[in-house]
């Protein structure tokens, strides 16, 4: 009996050792992408996956999780490619990962995104169809909020307004708090931390459906900014010195980068070369999100539609030979 | 690969979605009223707790520990609270305690009468059991986010979600407690001409009190377990600190906030257990 156990155990060890080997930094068969939970990263994943599968003959897979866990996965090498790292939202973590050499930035996917404090358009202009009067007709800039604390009333603290800040733990949250204080908005507004991204969206949708006032942090391009008619409150142009001092300017451009695990360039040099050229824009990304919204499509369908629509863009990222292979597969 | 026939698929979720949205608009005044009462309660408890000088609060905890457990336990509890303060999480702890007290208070207010009703009506008990099972197993995120439609972002949505998760034990154990009272006790009470209400308040409830206390203890512990999840809809307190730590992979803060929750759990568990033991002893002496 003992002998059998020993043999089973030994076999087990050999199998394990073999598995360990294939996972080391020689070659990889399957390229794993990170899905951190929002639609645009899924579209970008799907575009890159299609090109890699059809053009470079790799298998691909997607691992989902929160931003923090997927970044950790990328650092460990459990995830190979991350198509949308919002660097400013996780500034410390990102810089630490780059400095330690765990991850490598290949390209800037897009950096022309908008972020800041948004209000629904009907708050400023009203909405005749739904019979909503303009609640804050002269609201244009973040500073103008001062005049309208009652439009954005904090239900837990009547008499004061409520500005919904970024999700807990995001770097930008401190900047927004600084801004609120520096502009003196904290005299009439509460700086509310909503906990999670989902909570921001739900409170926006709730207010939007009821035609109530709402002001809070969000960013574009996203499915939410594509679906709801929102206005970004204006701020003075970004200025580094002023931003460092009290954050009272517009947000600095937030680089959304394509990053990979440190071993990836050696494991798949030709794919790395492709990803180094991967570059879109907010507008291009938003087109895919709009398509999803209008046609009730999933990210994969949107990616295929986008690739057919913008053939000139993605074919410039790869060699002609690869482009031909992918094109054939799309038809 | 076999495929489920397409013509048999249906969109049940869509009806629930419509129902939730319409309900939140149609019954807005009711939810508004609940919202106001709950907010006032939480704020009042929070203000009262924050009004206490920190050393008074530590002394109260030591005294409670001493009275219900032993002097040593009292000192340990005091040290725990002191440690939480030294992590500079004092305000967060108070907010968490306020949310838990409110949740547990409402749980008891609703749960104990429901438990009594279940003990007396087999039909009602049969209806409630699967509902309670569903409340305990439905993943909390499913009702956490829609709660915002009814109770806005913040502490009230958190209390609502906590309530759904934490109320089943007190209902179940209240039912069990009342059903568990020996028949001869009730018969003898009846033979003295007691009315049903008298039997309930003078025999069944006092006899069942230790079991009910166990239910209260479990409800409290489950409420504490919800504080981190509840912070995802904007509840403040220790849960929010844990959430911040998770989002930043800040292990130091995560440990401090996490261990603070554990400390609170130990204190609340031991004290409510101590209360249950006191009742038990009290009852034995009477008998």
Image (cartoon, helix red, strand yellow):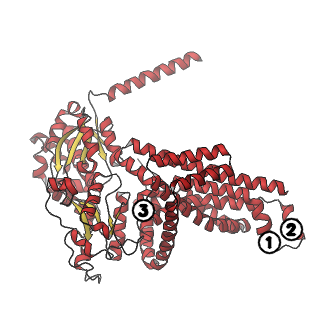
Which dot marks residue A30? none
Q: Is residue B275 left or right of residue B157?
A: right
Which type of secondary structure does the marked residue at label 2 adopt? helix
Instruction: State the residue in front, B1 or A205.
Output: A205
Label 3 belongs to which residue?
B145
Q: Is residue B5 above or below residue B72?
A: below
Residue B139: tell me if it is visible.
Answer: no
Please state which of the two labelled residues, at mark 3 or mark 2, is closer to the viewer.
2
Which residue lies at the image location 28% right of the left edge and 48% below the top edge? A90
Q: Is residue A186 left or right of residue B224?
A: left
Instruction: State the residue in front, B58 or A76.
Output: B58
Find out whether the residues at labels 2 and 1 contact each other: C-beta distance under 8 Å: yes
Find out whether the residues at labels 3 and 2 contact each other: C-beta distance under 8 Å: no
Discs 3, 1: same chain: yes
At label 2, counting other C-alpha atoms closer than 10 Å, the crowd grade (few under 14, some 14-19, many 20 or more) is some
Which dot marks residue B198? 1
What's the CA distance linking mark 2 and mark 1? 9 Å
Which residue lies at the image location 11% right of the left edge and 47% below the top edge? A315
């Amino acid at each position: 009996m003992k002998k059998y156990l020993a043999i089973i155990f030994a076999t087990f060890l050999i199998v394990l050792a073999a598995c360990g080997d294939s996972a080391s930094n020689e070659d990889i068969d399957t390229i794993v992408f990170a899905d951190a939970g929002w639609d645009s990263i899924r579209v970008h994943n799907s575009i890159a996956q299609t090109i890699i599968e059809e053009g470079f003959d790799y298998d691909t897979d997607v691992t989902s999780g929160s931003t923090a866990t997927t970044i950790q996965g990328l650092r460990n090498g459990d995830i190979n490619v991350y198509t949308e790292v919002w660097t400013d939202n996780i500034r410390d973590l990102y810089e630490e990962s780059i400095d330690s050499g765990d991850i490598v930035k290949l390209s800037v996917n897009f950096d022309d995104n908008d972020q800041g404090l948004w209000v629904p358009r009907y708050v400023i202009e009203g909405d005749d169809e739904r019979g909503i009067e303009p609640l804050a007709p002269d609201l244009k800039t973040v500073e103008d909020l001062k005049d309208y604390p009652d439009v954005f009333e904090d239900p837990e603290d009547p008499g004061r307004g409520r500005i919904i800040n970024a999700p807990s733990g995001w770097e930008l949250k401190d900047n927004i708090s600084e801004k609120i204080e520096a502009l003196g908005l904290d005299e009439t507004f509460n700086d509310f931390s909503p906990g999670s991204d989902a909570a921001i969206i739900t409170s926006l949708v709730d207010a939007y459906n009821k035609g109530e006032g709402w002001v809070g942090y969000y960013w574009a391009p996203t499915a939410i900014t594509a679906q709801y008619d929102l206005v970004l409150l204006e701020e003075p142009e970004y200025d580094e010195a002023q931003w460092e001092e009290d954050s009272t300017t517009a947000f600095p451009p937030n680089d959304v980068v394509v990053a990979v695990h440190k071993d990836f360039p050696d494991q798949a040099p030709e794919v790395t070369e492709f990803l180094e050229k991967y570059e879109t824009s907010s507008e291009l990304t938003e087109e895919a999100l709009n398509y999803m919204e209008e046609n009730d499509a999933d990210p994969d369908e949107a990616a295929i539609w986008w690739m057919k629509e913008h053939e000139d863009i993605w074919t410039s990222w790869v060699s002609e030979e690869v482009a031909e292979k992918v094109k054939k597969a799309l038809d | 690969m076999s495929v489920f026939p397409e013509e048999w698929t249906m969109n049940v979720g869509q009806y629930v979605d419509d129902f939730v949205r319409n309900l939140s608009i149609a019954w807005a005044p009711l939810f508004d009223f609940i919202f106001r009462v709950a907010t006032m309660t939480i704020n009042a408890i929070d203000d009262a707790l924050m009004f206490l000088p920190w050393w008074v609060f530590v002394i109260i905890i030591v005294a409670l520990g001493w009275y219900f457990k032993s002097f040593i336990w009292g000192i340990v509890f005091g040290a725990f609270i002191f440690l939480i303060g030294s992590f500079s999480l004092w305000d967060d702890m108070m907010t968490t305690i306020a949310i838990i007290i409110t949740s547990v208070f409402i749980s008891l207010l609703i749960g104990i009468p429901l438990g009594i009703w279940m003990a007396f009506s087999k039909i009602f008990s049969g209806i409630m059991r699967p509902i309670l099972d569903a409340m305990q197993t439905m993943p909390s995120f499913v009702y956490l986010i829609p709660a915002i439609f009814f109770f806005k972002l913040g502490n009230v949505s958190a209390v609502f979600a906590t309530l759904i998760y934490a109320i089943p034990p007190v209902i179940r154990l209240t039912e069990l407690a009342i059903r568990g009272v020996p028949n001869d006790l009730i018969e003898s009470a009846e033979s003295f001409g007691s009315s049903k209400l008298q039997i309930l308040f003078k025999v069944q409830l006092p006899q069942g009190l230790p079991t009910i206390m166990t239910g209260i203890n479990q409800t409290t512990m489950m409420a504490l377990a919800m504080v981190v999840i509840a912070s995802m809809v904007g509840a403040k307190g220790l849960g929010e600190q844990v959430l911040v730590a998770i989002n930043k992979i800040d292990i130091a803060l995560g440990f401090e906030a996490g261990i603070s929750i554990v400390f609170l759990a130990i204190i609340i568990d031991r004290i409510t257990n101590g209360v249950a033991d006191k009742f038990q002893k009290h009852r034995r002496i009477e008998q």
